[in-house]
Image (tube, rainbow, N blue to C red):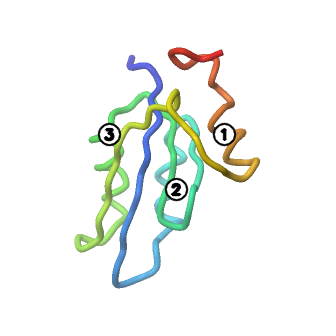
Amino acid sequence: MRADTTFFVTVNCDSRPIPNQQIESVLYGAKDWLRWSPDTYLIRTNLDAEEWFQRVRKVLDPKDNIFVVAVDLTQKAGWMTNLAINWVVRDEAALPGGQ
């Protein structure tokens, strides 16, 4: 089994609203996820980017865009809500280089 990875997932639906409810129904299959913005999520999973691309793509229209990329949480800076900060640092000790 693969180690957990955090992925940044972004969706662009130019011609319609983002189908967040459908996307989130798929993301419940991840170990954990956070909606970062209306079109962007962070997910924590032991599956790879291709698997998540295929899963989310099933609830999107063929004209919609999706991008899934691994995120290195050991390199971070910025301002976020407390909810987002807590999500990002919750498992920090388990990450390479974590404290």
User: Which quadrant of the figure contains the C terminus?
Assistant: top right
Which numbered disc, 3 or 2, marks the residue closer to the eye? Answer: 3
* Residue position for label 2: 25
Residue 37 percent coordinates (x, y): 56, 62
Residue density around tag 2, few if under 14, some if 14–19, many if 20 or more, within 10 Å: few
* Residue position for label 3: 49
Kind of residue at disc 1: Trp
Kind of residue at disc 2: Ser
CB-based contact (under 8 Å), mark 1 and mark 2: no
Residue 10 percent coordinates (x, y): 41, 58
Residue 76 shown left or right of residue 55 in the figure = right
Q: Return the residue found at the far bottom.
A: 15
Quadrant hosting residue 1: top left
> Upstream in the sequence, badge 1 or badge 2?
2
As drawn, 15 above or below 60: below
As drawn, 72 above or below 58: above
SS category of the residue bearing label 2:
helix
Residue occupying the point 29% across, 65% down: 65
* Residue position for label 1: 87
Q: Relative to the observer, which residue lies in front, 9 or 85?
A: 85
Residue occupying the point 58% across, 41% down: 77
Residue density around tag 1, few if under 14, some if 14–19, many if 20 or more, within 10 Å: some
> Upstream in the sequence, badge 3 or badge 1?
3
SS category of the residue bearing label 3:
helix
Residue 35 percent coordinates (x, y): 58, 55
Quadrant hosting residue 49: top left
Residue 84 percent coordinates (x, y): 67, 47
